[in-house]
Amino acid sequence: MSNTNHEETLGFQTEVKQLLNLMIHSLYSNREIFLRELISNAADACDKLRYAALDNDGLYEGDSELRVEIEHDADAGTVTLRDNGIGMTRDDVIANLGTIARSGTSEFLKQLSGEQQKDAKLIGQFGVGFYSSFIVADDVTVRTRKAGEDASTGVEWRSKGEGEFTVADIDLEQHGTEITLHLKDDAKEFADDFRLQNLVRKYSDHIEVPVRMPKTETAKDDDGNPVEGSEVTTWETVNEATALWVRPKSEISDDEYKAFYKHVAHDFSDPLTWSHNKVEGKLEYTSLLYVPGRAPFDMFDRDGARGVKLYVQRVFIMDDAEQFLPLYLRFIKGVLDTRDLSLNVSRELLQQDPKVDKIKGALTKRALDMLKKLAKDSEQYQTFWNTFGNVLKEGPGEDAANREKIAGLLRFASTHTDTAAQEHSLADYVGRMKEGQQKIYYVVADSFNAAKHSPHLEIFRKKGIEVLLLSDRIDEWLMSHLTEFDGKSFADVGKGELDLGEVEDEAEKKEQEETAKAKESLVKRVKEALGEGVQDVKVTHRLTDSPACVVLPEHEMGYQMRRIMEAAGQPLPEVKPILELNPSHSLVARLESADDGLFADLAHILLDQAIIAEGGHLDDPAAYVKRLNGVLAA
Ligand SMILES: Nc1ncnc2c1ncn2[C@@H]1O[C@H](COP(=O)(O)OP(=O)(O)OP(=O)(O)O)[C@@H](O)[C@H]1O
């Protein structure tokens, strides 16, 4: 018996209203996912009760056989989903089924365009959970009671998904949650045994909690005709109901792995790959790690949800256990089940347990190996790299022990193809190195085009030496942590002395020395004319087309990093560039023959232009324009 009271009508949070509108429209062709979302929530609720009952088995209220039940009524056009999990209090219901308590929600909603396919993808990435009920239902009733509480604390929530919902207190003998969907006219197909069973198998085989549906059997007489009144209804478990990761790999199909991924990652699309491992010995754990096919909406929020779902001996302990994977692998999703931790482990205890670090080390290795394997399929790996490359680039700085391994997974744009696609590995680069080349050369700039057209590349292009073209914000920081790959050191072509090693022969080196000598007086004059503006002036052989370039001392912070730090409000001591002049350029020849007045102007113009070509900002742009106009008008 239930009697209702303390009924109130509340408005959905604005974001929920927006999400409901957009979701119903854009997920229409993907409607069946509502069942997966609701079963997933019900299974999570059972997991939570099992965990809470570790300390207090009274919470089971004598009913420890956790389960999800699905019933339908074709005449009434309803589907009902019931679980005997943890349940919710009135406050829980109002918070969970009336708001979206996730940071970044309104930014996310702003990205939605009204274009069905695009929005469906984005919404899938965000996760719709319970609210997906309204894709198929025009009236939803939730009856729930928190396990361990009095029967009188039951709550009934109702809504038509149109901006408001009502909550009322009811008596509920049974703890857990029951959701009744009144199907829309065009969704009545779901009130069907066969359809529901298929969906349960499709989406929930891998969930450990049994999902049951009623089965009615009728006795037959000797002629095989049904005996009226002999109907007996029993509950039949429809799904496999074994935790997927516990089963032997050989018995699990790709489709099952994919379905399980969607459950753990709350993602609508398939993962790119996965790695399932059982480890016995000093450490005992089973892990099932996935590389998602796309980024979650909050990937660059370093405080966003990350980590694996943690189980101890098959008992769910927590979501997002971030202690088991480093930050630069925060895109990896999956499950860790271990015997090495105690059942009452908490987030705080995890931080102190030395076994956690050991497992973290092992999972990190597994994840990196999984990526290495994925890299064998260059198309798939490219999808991965384009989505998560910038996160993986945090790796060398964060995880010195795995630096070389991570370096092997990096991909770069390069002068080899001169396109912006980051598709060249360091191993590819090393394989293409010229005879006598000892270093891996790279240039860093603010944009791909600035990198590709950097004057520093001129000599490399002339000699056919490949240079990596780096232009992501993180790149200079990344390179500051990479010192070697395959025994070859890295060299930023915009810094320090140009050293082409044995790619240059003795005759060339001699010629350069002679040119430097011949231009000593020019260099001296330029240095005097520029005064404090430069650290040094040199003649260079790194240029073929440009008259001059600026170079930084080898250990100086690069321009890209400087600009990022300055933009972040970090004051940095001024750094003066080294100006290098191309002795065979006609402008430099003109400079050499100029009289003192023009000489100073030309020298400043060359310096300013070299800074501009580098993507830098002039201290006094008006002075540059004035000088240039003076020279042009002369
Ligand atoms: N059957 C249930 N039993 C108990 N609590 C539930 C149940 N269904 C939903 N909830 C509560 O409501 C919250 C919101 O559910 P919802 O499905 O909207 O989001 P979610 O499951 O947290 O995340 P996602 O949007 O990624 O699915 C859940 O986190 C849970 O606390």
Image (tube, rainbow, N blue to C red):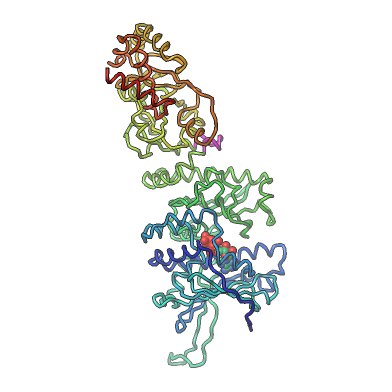
Q: Which residues are magenta?
A: 395-405
Q: Please provide percent x and percent y for residue 459.
A: 33, 21
Is residue 396 magenta-colored?
yes
Examine the rendered structure and indicate whether residue 188 appears above or below residue 557.
below
Quadrant in which residue 121 is drawn: bottom left
Examine the rendered structure and indicate whether residue 54 appears above or below residue 580.
below
> In the depicted view, which residue is nearer to us: 83 or 9?
9
Q: Residue at x 67, y 63 (%)?
A: 52
Ligand 1, by image quadrant, is bottom right
> In the depicted view, which residue is nearer to us: 542 or 258?
542
Quadrant containing the N terminus is bottom right
Is residue 483 magenta-colored?
no
Q: Please provide percent x and percent y for residue 72.
A: 49, 79
Quadrant containing the C terminus is top left
Q: Residue at x 52, y 90 (%)?
A: 230
Examine the rendered structure and indicate whether residue 177 appears above or below residue 245.
below
Q: Is residue 479 visible?
A: no
Q: Is residue 115 shown left or right of residue 330?
A: left
Q: Residue at x 45, y 78 (%)?
A: 191
Q: Please provide percent x and percent y for residue 450.
A: 36, 32
Examine the rendered structure and indicate whether residue 118 appears above or below residue 601.
below
Q: Say how many tags the image has.
A: 0
Q: Is residue 87 shown left or right of residue 263?
A: right
* Most common secondary structure along the magenta stretch: helix
Q: Is residue 223 visible?
A: yes
